[in-house]
Image (spheres, coloured by chain):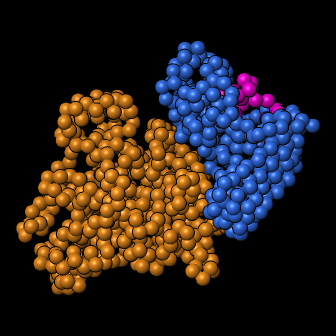
């Protein structure tokens, strides 16, 4: 078990004022069998009637609609959570995690990886299969930011050969699903300071096991989960809609420290 | 039944003045077209309607139980009644709608069930439309104009008044209302059924709203009046399809939707008519399983038959379909409005090969049906009575209880011998008389 002190800060500066700004934030960690949120502090500015709700995947969402003009928007979340992945409980599988989704359709390249893995994965458990998939993908892909964007699908990312955590997670999910291993997308934070992180979870005998293909490791107690879903589209930390704004500059800082 | 023929031109002229139009998108261009009306009605006898009423009620009840199940416990999948592919691969299945309990547990408040009658007089269900079935307004206004043109016709024939639809619809909107006004939400005048949206608002007394008139705050949907006053909305009858309904959950680029509407719906503060996510139950692939769903949920024998359908997803059907392409109608399960419907016999050998390859590549995308020899209906065309293929869209309304509208939209093919009756494919329409004795 690890006790984690975390903080997430996001600031957007608009070059000209915006109005009718609607947003949905998936930035609140939830408590479950293996992750317990002990302290939570939240500040959203500006805000109107901040409302907490949930989505179809069980994530916590904060929503609001700011009517007055503003040029700055900021979200700050901090707190303390205890994580113990050995305490995970069995969950019933939602069938959607077996099937391709918007970002995780397999094209020629992903299918090729899947076929190579299929041979190696004969008789292996879902967890072992996911490990083999991770190794195969990492052989074909290197970490580099600025090459892909939030619209890049798993197949496109693999074709380019370079990308970020979102792409690693999507490819991992796509190939696992193609091999019959249910998989889902996770957004959260890992130990250290930087941006938020994305990884995958695979379903093995009732348990969702975390795998982080970007860092070539299994998820341990130093990871904090914010949301999960079929792929990136279900897990946007900040989804917003507004009128006006010109250009926008976004600054994000995520910190997790073991205490 | 021929008493109104002399008034055909006059009534069509009035329909055009009232703006009874249908919009068609062709090659990305929007064309507004009059919806040609034929004055010879389709007549349903009292007994015939009673039979249809029983069958439609049964079907709609089972489909609603299916929707409750599939967005909840999913017993139907665990019990193996339906292969899960037909749910999870369906574009109509919306995971963001899972575990929402709609008001009164009703999903398909307004169902448009398309039927045809064979030459042997058997009725077959061709399609269930559970998303935003349109068309009720056309026979309503046509009846109104027919009555004005020839009052005696309706004195001499005992026909149920179809103008009750407005009251029936209002009752459904009231039954599921979660506190507040009723609103009909239209995407705007470029929608193919804009006439209908405004007409139904008038008939039900609901407030007629454009997307920018509505907003969500604190999980509650409001209508904002011209003066700036806000009024809480208890039921929204939205004529915007699911993917455009809420840009915060579905297509982010949608400008037609109301941000956070799904949150307000999930919180149980507004009834959404029809419920989002119904597409999973009116998918052409799921259609194959509706008789099985009726047996499963109700323990009853289906009263209405499906058209004989083959599912290439199943190996044995795949072979039959590939062998008999020239005798079958092949439908792409993800298309609607008459798009993606191919008659095997009309295809060139090259087209047939392309189709065969597409079926082999993704069998789940297609269903194949035997061509039903429809009973022809009389149509007055070019100064004489002639025969055309026609279908019937029956409207079934579901609030506190299920009721079948004593009327319906009869659509006929414009071309002689054609089986395609969809208004988006250029068909015309007729009134449907349900006799009261």
Relative to B32, residue A257 above or below:
above
Residue located at (89% from left, 35% from top):
A258
Residue A89 showing in the rendered view = yes
Give the residues drawn in magenta, as a range: A199-223
Residue B317 place in picture, x, y as percent: 31, 32
Relative to A10, residue A93 above or below:
above
Residue located at (79% from left, 35% from top):
A190
Q: Quadrant of residue A24?
A: bottom right
Left or right: B192 with respect to A6?
Answer: left
Left or right: A190 with respect to B246?
Answer: right
Which quadrant would the C terminus of chain B be assigned to in this image? bottom left
**Image colour assigned to chain B:** orange
Q: Quadrant of residue B403?
A: bottom left
Tell me if residue A160 is in the magenta stretch: no
Q: Which chain is blue?
A: A
Q: Nearer the viewer, residue B7 or A150?
A: A150
Furthest-right residue in this view? A259
Relative to B235, residue B227 above or below:
below
Residue located at (36% from left, 54% from top):
B28
């Amino acid at each position: 078990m690890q006790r984690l002190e975390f903080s997430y800060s996001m600031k957007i500066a608009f070059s000209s004022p915006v109005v009718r700004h609607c947003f949905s934030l998936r930035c609140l960690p939830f408590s479950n069998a293996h992750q317990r949120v002990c302290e939570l502090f939240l500040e959203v500015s500006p805000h109107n009637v901040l409302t907490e709700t949930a989505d179809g995947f069980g994530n916590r969402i904060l929503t609001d609609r700011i009517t007055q003009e503003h040029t700055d928007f900021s979200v700050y979340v901090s707190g303390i959570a205890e994580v113990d992945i050995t305490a995970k409980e069995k969950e019933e599988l939602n069938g959607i995690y077996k099937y391709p989704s918007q970002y995780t359709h397999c094209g020629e390249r992903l299918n090729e990886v899947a076929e190579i893995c299929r041979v190696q994965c004969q008789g292996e458990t879902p967890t072992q299969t996911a490990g083999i998939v991770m190794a195969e993908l990492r052989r074909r892909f290197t970490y580099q930011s600025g090459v892909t964007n939030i619209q890049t699908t798993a197949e496109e990312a693999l074709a380019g050969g370079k990308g970020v955590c979102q792409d690693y997670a999507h490819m991992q999910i796509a190939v696992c699903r193609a091999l019959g291993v249910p998989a889902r997308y996770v957004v959260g934070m890992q130990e250290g300071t930087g941006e938020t992180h994305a990884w995958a979870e695979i379903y093995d005998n009732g348990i969702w096991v975390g795998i982080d293909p970007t860092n070539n490791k299994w998820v341990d107690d130093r990871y904090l989960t914010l949301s999960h879903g079929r792929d990136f589209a279900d897990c946007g930390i900040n989804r917003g809609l507004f009128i006006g704004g010109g250009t926008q500059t976004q600054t994000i800082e995520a910190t997790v420290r073991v205490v | 039944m021929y008493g109104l023929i002399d008034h055909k031109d006059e009534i069509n002229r009035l329909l055009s003045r009232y703006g009874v139009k249908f919009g068609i998108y062709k090659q990305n261009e929007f064309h507004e077209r009059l919806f040609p009306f034929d004055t010879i009605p389709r007549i349903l006898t009292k007994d015939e309607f009673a039979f249809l009423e029983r069958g439609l009620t049964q079907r709609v009840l089972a489909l609603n139980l299916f929707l409750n199940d599939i967005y909840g416990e999913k017993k139907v999948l665990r019990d193996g009644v339906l292969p899960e592919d037909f749910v999870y691969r369906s574009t109509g299945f919306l995971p963001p709608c899972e575990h929402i309990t709609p008001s009164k547990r009703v999903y398909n408040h307004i169902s448009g069930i398309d039927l045809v009658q064979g030459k042997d007089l058997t009725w077959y269900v061709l399609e269930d439309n559970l998303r935003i079935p349109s068309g009720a307004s056309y026979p309503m206004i046509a009846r109104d104009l027919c009555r004005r043109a020839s009052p005696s016709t309706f004195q001499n024939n005992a026909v149920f008044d179809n103008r009750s639809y407005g009251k029936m619809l209002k009752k459904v909107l009231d039954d599921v209302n979660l506190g507040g006004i009723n609103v009909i939400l239209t995407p705007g005048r470029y929608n193919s059924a804009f006439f209908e949206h405004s007409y139904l608002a008038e008939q039900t007394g609901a407030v007629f709203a454009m997307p920018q008139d509505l907003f969500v705050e604190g999980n509650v949907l409001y209508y904002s009046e011209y003066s700036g006053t806000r009024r809480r909305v208890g039921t929204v009858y939205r004529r915007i399809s699911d993917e455009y309904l809420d840009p915060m959950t579905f297509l982010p680029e949608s400008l037609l939707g109301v941000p956070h509407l799904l949150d307000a719906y999930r919180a149980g503060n507004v009834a959404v008519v029809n419920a989002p996510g119904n597409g999973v139950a009116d998918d052409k692939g799921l259609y194959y399983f509706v008789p099985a769903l009726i047996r499963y949920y109700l323990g009853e024998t289906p009263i209405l038959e499906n058209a004989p359908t083959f599912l290439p997803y199943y190996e044995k059907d795949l072979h039959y379909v590939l062998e008999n392409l020239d005798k079958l109608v092949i439908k792409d399960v993800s298309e609607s409005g008459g798009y993606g419907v191919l008659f095997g016999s009309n295809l060139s050998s090259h087209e047939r090969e392309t189709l065969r390859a597409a079926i082999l590549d993704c069998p789940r995308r297609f269903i194949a049906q035997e061509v039903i020899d429809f009973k022809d209906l009389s149509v007055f065309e070019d100064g004489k009575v002639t025969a055309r293929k026609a279908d019937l869209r029956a409207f079934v309304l579901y609030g506190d209880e299920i009721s079948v509208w004593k009327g319906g939209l009869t659509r006929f093919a414009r071309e002689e011998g054609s089986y395609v009756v969809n208004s988006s494919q250029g068909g015309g329409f007729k009134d449907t008389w349900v006799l009261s004795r």
